[in-house]
Amino acid sequence: MDKEKGLRRLIAVVGHADLAPWTLALLEEELRARLAQCAEAGRTGLVRVGQGLPVAFGRAAKKAGLVLVAVVPTLNRVPALLRERDWLAAGELLLLSQQVRLLEYDPADRDACVRADERLLRSCARVVAIWDGTASNGHDATAHLVAYARSHGIGVEVLWPDGAERVPGLGEKPS
């Protein structure tokens, strides 16, 4: 399938789960400007529900006029129970989205979340990676997802604005 047609017109975001609140505010504005260009090109944003970066991406997509698709986890074809800290974020993303996509994975299982992200990335033409360049570890899979996207011929744009910071302890599980 041509990367510029059909599902391959999707743009996704991946990044660290432990981004500082001020970093999320910086990113939201930076993403809005970049996503406005994607909206003009007729692309669609894709984001897995969760707090932090997914919400910043969703807000930026809405402000930029980009169509947004929220991905909700399911277990046995029934919406999966999210962590309590993700409830409000998931609700906001659903309100910001024009479409909801269900995906079978356990949101409490880190490896299942990484496999879900890999499946989502395979349907994308482009990935915006909010990444400070550090290697993946037992909790954060950002470097892995960047390498995965690149190895599958998916365009990756790395974004790490001046002043961006991570807060240790926020990202104990991927979101």
Image (cartoon, rainbow, N blue to C red):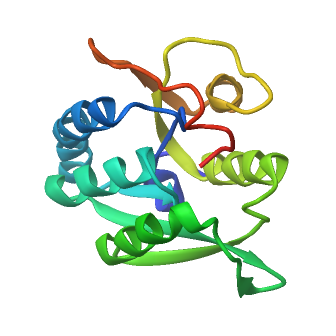
Q: Position of residue 25 (x, y in %)?
A: 24, 37
Horizontally, is 53 left or right of 56 in the view? right
Horizontally, is 46 left or right of 133 in the view? left
Q: Residue at x 47, y 54 (%)?
A: 51
Q: Is residue 52 visible?
A: yes
Most foreground residue, 64 or 90 = 90
Q: Residue at x 16, y 37 (%)?
A: 33
Q: Position of residue 74 (x, y in %)?
A: 72, 77
Does 87 appear above or below 121? below
Horizontally, is 107 left or right of 123 in the view? right
Most foreground residue, 121 or 144 = 144
Most foreground residue, 103 or 161 = 161
Does 4 appear above or below 164? below
Q: Residue at x 24, y 49 (%)?
A: 41
Q: Position of residue 118 (x, y in %)?
A: 71, 45
Q: Position of residue 145 (x, y in %)?
A: 66, 32
Q: Is residue 2 visible?
A: no
Residue 53 quadrant: top left
Badge count: 0
Residue 45 quadrant: bottom left
Q: Residue at x 71, y 77 (%)?
A: 80
Residue lying farthest front? Answer: 169
